[in-house]
Image (tube, grey):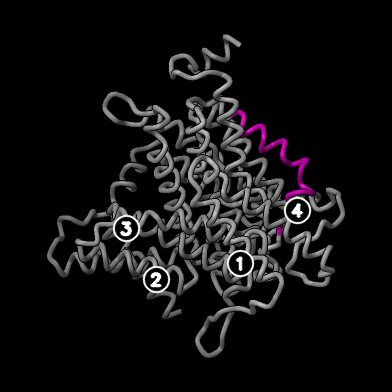
Amino acid sequence: MEKVKKFFKIEERGTSVRQELIGGLVTFLAMAYILALNPGILGDSDALGAAAFPAGGVFVATAIAAGVATLLMGLFANYPIALAPGMGINAFIAYTVIAPWGNGYTWQEALAAVFISGIIFLVISLTPIRKWIINAVPNGLKKAIGAGIGFFIAFIGLQNAGIIVPDAAVSVSLGDLSDPAVLLAVFGIVVALSFFVMKGKISKFALILSMAVTAVVGIAMTYIFGLTGNAGLPTFGEFNYSSLSEFKETFFGFAKGFKTVFSHTDLWFVLFSLIYLDIFDTAGTLIAVSEPAGLLDEEGNLKDVDKAMLADAIGTTVGAMVGTSTVTSFVESSAGIEAGARTGLSSVVVGVLFLVSIVAFPIFNIFIGSFALTSMALVLVGILMFSQIKNIDFSDLPTLGAAFIIIVMMVLTYSIGMGIAFGFIAYVLMMMVQKRFKEVNPVMYVLAVAFIAYFAVEALF
């Protein structure tokens, strides 16, 4: 035990082994929803058809990637921060990269792109390039991207639940509220919002609690009220692990994608989006939890931030190898930090729990693919991401205009990458009109020109 305390600097950081164990458990419970939500999004066969990931394989990949990356964060960086496939990035992969209406990649090609982005992020984490990229984008645009992703994934959740449906006359409209599955989804959102606004620590577990409560109600509707014929309601199914055999498809599935991924002319655009989102997801989370976790040095800088970034980059690479989207740091780690976690020991606990959770697959399988049970999670995560909008300086007109374009174009083009591209172009253009040339980082000029060239090529060819 003394070796453990010394290795994780338990006493130096003013904590205890007991606090770290409790903090790790709390963090895991706060983010365990990803085990159901990630396979549900990447394996959304209703929307993606044959392009959808094998959901059982993604479940195993999610648990392994989260487990390995979080263990690495704990053992290598000694940070009380957990990692898993990121929300927003998985939606980008599913509904932009591989969707039939999007870039049209196969899921194997998408994994190849994630793997390549992980390697690039790994290199970036070892060089000053990471700081250049972070400093190049104005803070207001960073926050707008986060808020826009919040709108985007909430919109996806409402659509998948049938609350919002396609409409030939006005594009979208309200769904059929007499449908039991839609009613269950509405109930779930109400429950999630109720937990979210409760005072005290219970709000930290709003996602997992609302999913559990909605599952119980959904199962009751299915079996007690005889609604077993409704495909949108949850069912117990067979208590077995047969779907996990799909892991043999996702494991090293990226290798098959390598054969054709370079034939896509927009690969650079996809890679830029993946790397950008991962860098700012990680940086944002580290900044958000650094002070309460005691991770700042005397000058206010993050201690061993390079190690944390490296753990994140390796996690993404491992995730792509086993079959899931980009791995990133989770802000839900703040729940464990509030419970007392201060060292990487708590991350070790989270990592082990993610790996062990594979045996609980039959339970999580109730949620996978049932958007009546998971739509509230997408809406609630959307709200949390939308809260970043308060940090945008709306008095600066170019920032205001670009932020609006980023957010609205993400939703209306059904693409996170497109929102970023249009917003960056608009920002540079407006700054030039105001003759504020020197205030724009040279990297932004390069990106704006690259995006314009991309759209020009797409239009011509």
Residue 396 screen position, x and y as percent: 20, 61
- Residue, disc 2: 408
Q: Amino acid at mark 1?
A: Val
- Residue at far bottom of view: 169
Question: Mark 3 vs mark 4: which is more N-terminal?
Answer: 3
Q: Amino acid at mark 2?
A: Val
Q: In this orientation, does residue 68 appear? A: yes
Q: In this orientation, does residue 89 appear? A: no
Residue 82 - label: none
Question: Mark 2 vs mark 4: which is more N-terminal?
Answer: 4
Report the residue at 53% width, 16% height from top: 7
Mark 1 neighbour class, 10 Å CA radius: few under 14, some 14 to 19, many 20 or more: many
Report the residue at 44% width, 55% height from top: 385
Mark 4 neighbour class, 10 Å CA radius: few under 14, some 14 to 19, many 20 or more: many
- Residue at far left of view: 435
Residue 365 - label: 4
Q: Nearer the viewer, mark 2 or mark 1?
A: 1
Which secondary structure class fits the magenta region best?
A: helix
- Residue, disc 1: 186
Question: SS at mark 2?
Answer: helix
Q: CA distance from mark 2 to mark 4?
A: 34 Å
Q: Do labels 2 and 1 touch, CB within 8 Å? A: no
Residue 206 screen position, x and y as percent: 56, 49
Q: CA distance from mark 3 to mark 1?
A: 32 Å
Question: Mark 3 vs mark 1: which is more N-terminal?
Answer: 3
